[in-house]
Amino acid sequence: METGNTHTPLWPPSAPPTLVEGPDGLRDDSTSGAQVLEGQHAFGSELRRARHAAGLTLSRLAARVHYSKAQLSKVETGQKRPSEELARLCDAALGAEGALLRLVPVLSVPHTEREPAAGEAGGSGGTPARRGLLAAGAAAVLGTAATPSATASPAADGALLDISRNLFAEFRRLGQSAPPGAVLPALAEQTRVLRLLARRSGARTRDGLIALSSRYAEFAGWMAQEAGDEQAALRLTDQAVELAAAAGDSDLASYARVRRALVSYYRGDAAETLALTATVRSPALPPRILGLAAVQEAEGHALAGDHGSSMRALDRARALLARAPADPAQPVLGASHVPDQVAMITGWCLLDLGRPREAAEVFDREMCRVAPTALRTRARYGTRQALAHALAGDIDRACALTHDVLSAVHTVGSATVALDVRRLSRTLARHPRHRAVKEVEPLLAFALSPAARLL
């Protein structure tokens, strides 16, 4: 539907407002009160125009998006600043194809690099664990691999590589049920061990161990992002590329751009997410990498409010991932605990597109297929499942799911999951008189408190 949007956003993409997080949420620290009011009026005017074009009363729109009529009235008259969440819901309800979302100022907290804790990748200290994975660069690995042991045998080498791969699978399982800060030191130490083993192995096993160490670095990048340290995550991903290239695998460099796109997605930067995934299109790349890039592209389009492009990217991802050959000798790239990744991400995208009822149906179906032991996966998608039900107006179901998922959220300590827990908390807070909300609110408050992260 044409919306006739002629408004120009007050903040161009190159200069978003600077926001800081305070006890009452995000506040603008760079724009004047007049600019904020002007932006509110621009959004409200377009919302009212689109609502009238759709033939909806304020009451009917409020019922569709599960906001109160009074709240919507304040947004339309410019008295209340719109949230991205409301813009996405109204875009979907009015068929505005992202026009309202584009009128909301970019709400992002400036990144400040966290100093890695002792024992984490990138942290300081004299022990191998504290030196972290960054100390295990490709040059160091190749240097130690130059003098294989004279006593190495092909049989022993083969067994060594098999055991090391099996151990990596166990670390992946550990990452599903432990906080990232607890897993990172172990990954650093194992990378040091792989360097020593590569020194003592024959050429074939040496290359295999170096390639495996690149997967350790890539996985450590995931754990660093889960710990809330995106700069360490990017450094570790770059290191994984160097190690993979040293072992003769140049394809991981393309996958690294997919990983960078995911970091951009969690920053809320749709344009950068899409720009990065657009560079991963070469037909010479393995289907799995191309499929994962298409998944990330779909999330970028959903973040931008583009339903059609998001669904087309998901269709392409499904076809590519179906073509990816399974190699039991190599660790799988990307998620390995989601039975149908494209189906689950479809729910994820529908939620970002302001279609929570459709998203809830997908999550309800797919969450039944996730193993009970995959706590990190259950925390990530279970939180989105609860959020979808909350945004769809099913508050009792949302609160019941919140009760179920918070123990997993607390156990895995994920910074990315915490973003959606905050969204869930804000959504439920719109229903302060609901009995189930009153019961779950203290649990949500504790889950988001600094005290919870210390336990």
Image (cartoon, rainbow, N blue to C red):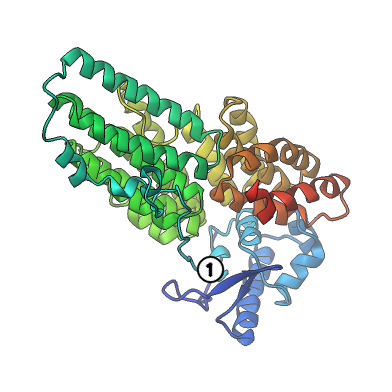
Q: Which residue is disc 1 drawn over?
A: 106
Q: Residues within 10 Å of mark 1 (few under 14, many from 20)?
A: many
Split into 4 quadrants, where in the image is the N terminus?
bottom right
Q: Is residue 192 above or below residue 227?
A: above
Place of residue 345 in the rendered image (x, y in percent of width and height, measured from the top left): 51, 39
Q: Could you say which is closer to the camera, residue 62 or residue 385?
A: 385
Residue 114 makes an appearance in the image? yes
Q: Is residue 175 above or below residue 413?
A: above
Residue at 31 percent across and 38 percent down: it is 192
Residue 286 makes an appearance in the image? no
Q: Quadrant of residue 83?
A: bottom right
Furthest toward the top, the residue is 155
Place of residue 336 in the rendered image (x, y in percent of width and height, measured from the top left): 45, 30
Direction from residue 410 to residue 253 in the image, left or right: left
Direction from residue 1 to residue 122 in the image, left or right: left
Q: Secondary structure at mark 1?
A: loop
Place of residue 77 in the rendered image (x, y in percent of width and height, measured from the top left): 73, 76
Furthest toward the front, the residue is 126
Place of residue 375 in the rendered image (x, y in percent of width and height, measured from the top left): 59, 33
Residue at 85 percent across and 49 percent down: it is 438
